[in-house]
Image (cartoon, helix red, strand yellow):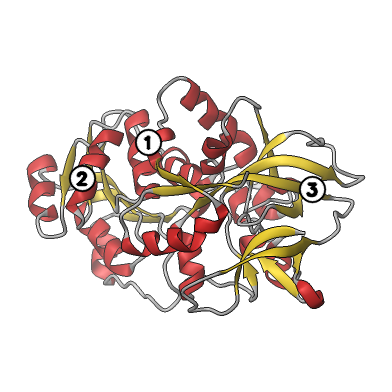
Amino acid sequence: MARAAVLRNIGDKHLELRDDVTTIETGPTQVKIKIKATGVCHSDLSVMTGILPATIPAILGHEGAGIVTEVGDHVTNVAVGDHVVVNWGPDCGQCRECRRGEPYLCVTFIGDAFGVPRFTLPGGEGAFGMAGAGTWADELVVPWQSAIKIAEDVPFEYAALLGCGIPTGVGAVFNTAKVTPGSTVAVIGAGGVGLSVIQGARIAGASTILAIDPNEAKHEIAKKFGATHTATLDNFQETSGLLTGGGFDYAFEVVGRSAAIQTAWAVTRRGGDVIVVGAGAMDDDWSMNAFSLLFEGKSVKASLYGGCDLGRDVPLFVDLWRAGKLDLESLITRRIRFEDLNDAVEALHAGDVIRQVVLMD
């Protein structure tokens, strides 16, 4: 039996924190992972509110790290005892998207994520893992492609962040935008992923980094991670004009709302790039008139999972952390226990935390 945080119904404010959940049996191409640390990400809240889809009942959590405890007969990439990061977007390596070098677009495992229970509740009821994962549990069973091996000296609470927040944010800079040294960058939203975008832009050598967030309490934090300037929604256009004269080379939307995409468009120079990082709702439409779309020459690019190949990029992020260039510690607002998860969800609602990390031991 294992502990797990169960979402019974979309719209529920609280999760069932249970200690009587079991995983499915480990199949020949699957891996069982004992979760040691897991992050509390805004996407988890988006599942609870219905912005992101999920099959109910669901074990939440998708950003985690742990130790391999079982491997299937056909698994060769990891062994029992290995430390791993959970990849919630596993790629098959063989479909057209994977062969094009776009593993983050692979949909091979998506059907199973929403249609095959990964856990069993008392009475035999199946439960699904969020995004095919479910890291808010003591253990989980995932395809071998979801287990990314890391060095044993990387603290689990740091490794957990390499499963979502860091690749989504830093990856958007490195892989999707390909920010160049000396360029100018605006970031709309200074939450956990937004701060990772800011870090990525700093590492990439951007000369000017403007963090735009209505919560002024986040401005000093943004500067700690590399923002050179900050603005609210009331003065971002004036600030943008003073800093660039004609807009930013790259603007990253990291909120998940159409209004934030519009803000990103507004601060981007002619010919610049708007990078959509936030996960928005399916009914939140954004429109642009055809004249502006053509004659302003701007490009709108989606950055799903930061355009990452986690097998390639996680070692890169670890190297950046070792070199003192990637600050993981400052992203962690507080370390909590499993029994604190409902309080953590409330803190996420309030917006006064960057990343809360659950230490499962």
Q: In the rendered structure, which disc, 2 or 1, sits on the residue that comes first in sequence? A: 2
Which mark is drawn over residue 127?
Answer: none
Residue at figure coordinates x 33%, y 72% from the top left: 286
Q: On screen, 111 above or below 245?
A: below
Q: Disc 2 designates what residue?
A: 219
How far apart marks 1 and 3 lie (CA) works out to 31 Å
Q: In the rendered structure, which disc, 1 or 3, sits on the residue that comes first in sequence? A: 3
Whether residue 6 is visible here, answered yes or no, is yes
- Residue 218 at x, y percent in the picture: 24, 48
How far apart marks 2 and 1 lie (CA) works out to 14 Å
Q: Residues within 10 Å of mark 2 (few under 14, many from 20)?
A: many
Q: Disc 1 designates what residue?
A: 330
Q: On screen, 11 above or below 270?
A: below
Residue at figure coordinates x 78%, y 36% from the top left: 78
Q: Amino acid at mark 2?
A: His
Q: Nearer the viewer, mark 1 or mark 3?
A: 1
Q: Disc 3 designates what residue?
A: 31
Mark 1 touches mark 3? (CB < 8 Å): no
How far apart marks 2 and 3 lie (CA) works out to 41 Å
Q: Amino acid at mark 1?
A: Ser
- Residue 215 at x, y percent in the picture: 21, 55
Q: Helix or strand or loop: what does disc 3 sit on? A: strand
Q: Residues within 10 Å of mark 1 (few under 14, many from 20)?
A: few
The picture quadrant where one finds residue 280 is bottom left
Residue at figure coordinates x 15%, y 55% from the top left: 232
Q: Amino acid at mark 3?
A: Val
